[in-house]
C-alpha cells in the first residue's frame, strides 16, 4: 500500500491499463473469480434446487443481455458479481451447480452463492433446500479437486491464491431469522447487540476457513440499509420511514464487521480481507435518489402492495417501464443500475467505502507483485 500511496489515481489507472495490454498480448487468462453468499450475488444455483428462493421466472432478467430472460439472478439484469467480472475483463462466473461448469470453464472461477442463506445455519430454514455457508465452502474444496484434475495441484493452488473472491452474507440473519417473526427463537436467545457480536464471531470462523482454503484477496460486503428496502417499508415502516429496528441492526453489524476484518488482516500479516462498505454506497442513493438519477428509492420496480414491497416479483406484478430510474428492482434487491453504482464504489471508492483499499488499487498492487 505504501508503495502506491505516492501515485495519483490516474497513474495507477495507467499502470493497470499497461499491465492489461502486456497480459493480453501474452494471451494470459484473467484472474479467477469466486463468489459466496446470498441472493444479492447468486447467479442461479437455486435454479437447481427444490426451494421457493428462486428467480427463474419473468420478469426477472428482463434486461439481462443478450437473452432478456430469467437466469436465477435476483435482478432485472446484471448483479454485482457480473459487473465485477466485466471490470476484470472476464466472463461471468457460472453457478457451481450448473452442468455447464466443466473443463476449461472451471478456470474462470465459480459462483457458490445461494439465495436465502445467512451466516448461521438456521437462517432461511423456511427455504429448505439452499446451499448454506458451510456447504458453499465444501463445494469450494471440491472445486479445487476438480481443477487439480485439469491443470495439476500446483497450478490449481496458484489459481486459487491469485483469484479474487467476493462474499456477501449477513442480511438474511436479520431479515430471515432474528426479525422473521415476532419473538423469534434467536431474538429470545439474544438481545440485538449480543446477537450481532455472535454473528461477527461466526462470520470470522467462515472467513478463516476461506483463508485456509487458499483465498488471498477477499472483498467482504456489509449489509445494505435493511430497514429501507421496499419490503420493510411495506411491513414495518411508518409513513414511508425506514424500519428503525432493522436500521439499528445494520448500524451495529457493519462497523463491527469492518473491525473484525482489519483484525484478521493483522493476525495474518497482510491485507487479505477488504471491507466493502456497500451499505454506505446504498445509503447514499436511498438518502438522495435524485442525485444518482433515480426517481425513487422507496418503491420497487417490480412487486405489489405498498411500495411494491409485498411478496415476490411475478409475471402478474406491477412492473415499471424504465428500470434505470429505480434503486430497487424488487422488494429486497437493488436494480442493475444500483448495482452499477455500488460496483463503481468498489472499484474506485475512498477508504470510507473500501478499507483498506479499493479494487483498482488491489489490481495495480497485484500486477506489480506478479
Image (cartoon, helix red, strand yellow):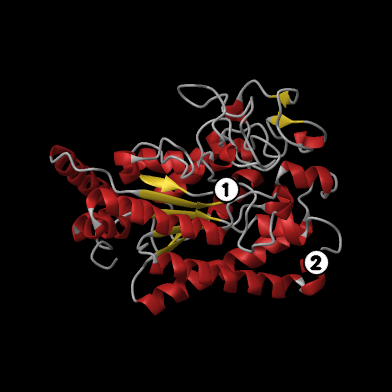
* Other-residue count near label 2 (Cα within 10 Å), few / some / many at <14 / 14–19 / ≥20: few
Seen in the picture, residue 130 relative to 195 is either above or below; the reply is: above
Residue 300: horizontal and vertical position, in percent? 70, 34
Q: Residue at x 61, y 29 (%)?
A: 60
In what element is the residue under mark 1? loop
* Other-residue count near label 1 (Cα within 10 Å), few / some / many at <14 / 14–19 / ≥20: many
In what element is the residue under mark 2? helix
Between marks 2 and 1, how big is the CA–CA gap? 23 Å
Q: Residue at x 53, y 58 (%)?
A: 135
Quadrant of res 162: bottom left
Seen in the picture, residue 112 relative to 308 is either above or below; the reply is: below
Seen in the picture, residue 113 relative to 306 is either above or below; the reply is: below
Q: Is residue 138 left or right of residue 224?
A: left
Taking the image as drawn, is residue 8 in sight?
no
**Where the C terminus falls, by quadrant?**
bottom left
Residue 345: horizontal and vertical position, in percent? 46, 48
Residue 25: horizontal and vertical position, in percent? 13, 38
Residue 267 or residue 202, whichever sits in front: 202
Residue 243: horizontal and vertical position, in percent? 78, 53
Residue 346 or residue 169, whichever sits in front: 169
Residue occupied by mark 2: 185
Q: Is residue 181 left or right of residue 78?
A: right
Residue occupied by mark 1: 114
Q: Residue at x 44, y 44 (%)?
A: 344
The answer to whether marks 2 and 1 mark residues whose Cβ atoms lie closer than 8 Å is: no
Q: Is residue 226 left or right of residue 70?
A: right
**Where the N terminus falls, by quadrant?**
bottom left
Q: Earlier in the sequence, mark 2 or mark 1?
A: 1
Taking the image as drawn, is residue 337 in sight?
yes
Amino acid at each position: 500500500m505504501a508503495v502506491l500511496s505516492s501515485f495519483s489515481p490516474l497513474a495507477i489507472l495507467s499502470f493497470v491499463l499497461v499491465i492489461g495490454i502486456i497480459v493480453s498480448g501474452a494471451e494470459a487468462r484473467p484472474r479467477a473469480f469466486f463468489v459466496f453468499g446470498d441472493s444479492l450475488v447468486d447467479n442461479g444455483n437455486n435454479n437447481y434446487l427444490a426451494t421457493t428462493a428462486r428467480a427463474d421466472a419473468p420478469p426477472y432478467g428482463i434486461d439481462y443481455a443478450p437473452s432478456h430472460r430469467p437466469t436465477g439472478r435476483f435482478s432485472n439484469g446484471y448483479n454485482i458479481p457480473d459487473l465485477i467480472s466485466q471490470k476484470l475483463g472476464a466472463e461471468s462466473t457460472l453457478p457451481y451447480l450448473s452442468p455447464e461448469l466443466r473443463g476449461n470453464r472451471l478456470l474462470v472461477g465459480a459462483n457458490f452463492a445461494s439465495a436465502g442463506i445467512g451466516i448461521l445455519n438456521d437462517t432461511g430454514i423456511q427455504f429448505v433446500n439452499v446451499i448454506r455457508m458451510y456447504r458453499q465452502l465444501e463445494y469450494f474444496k471440491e472445486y479445487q479437486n476438480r481443477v487439480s484434475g485439469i491443470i495439476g495441484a500446483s497450478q490449481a493452488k496458484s489459481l486459487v491464491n491469485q483469484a479474487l473472491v467476493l462474499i456477501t452474507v449477513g442480511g438474511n440473519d436479520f431479515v430471515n431469522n432474528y426479525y422473521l417473526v415476532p419473538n423469534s427463537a434467536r431474538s429470545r436467545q439474544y438481545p440485538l447487540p449480543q446477537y450481532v457480536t455472535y454473528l461477527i464471531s461466526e462470520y470470522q470462523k467462515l472467513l478463516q476457513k476461506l483463508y485456509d482454503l487458499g483465498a488471498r484477496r477477499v472483498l467482504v460486503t456489509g449489509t445494505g440499509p435493511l430497514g429501507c428496502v421496499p419490503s420493510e417499508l411495506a411491513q414495518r415502516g411508518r409513513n414511508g420511514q425506514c424500519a428503525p429496528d432493522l436500521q439499528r441492526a445494520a448500524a451495529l453489524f457493519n462497523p463491527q464487521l469492518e473491525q473484525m476484518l482489519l483484525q484478521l488482516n493483522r493476525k495474518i500479516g497482510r491485507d487479505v480481507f477488504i471491507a466493502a462498505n456497500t451499505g454506505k454506497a446504498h445509503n447514499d442513493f436511498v438518502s438522495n435518489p435524485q442525485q444518482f438519477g433515480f426517481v425513487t428509492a422507496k418503491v420497487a420496480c417490480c412487486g405489489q402492495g405498498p411500495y411494491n414491497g409485498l411478496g415476490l416479483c411475478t409475471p402478474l406484478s406491477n412492473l415499471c417501464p424504465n428500470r434505470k430510474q429505480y434503486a430497487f428492482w424488487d422488494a429486497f434487491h437493488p436494480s442493475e443500475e444500483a448495482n452499477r453504482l455500488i460496483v463503481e464504489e468498489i472499484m474506485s471508492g475512498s477508504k470510507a467505502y473500501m478499507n483498506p483499499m479499493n479494487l483498482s488499487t488491489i489490481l495495480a498492487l497485484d500486477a506489480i507483485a506478479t
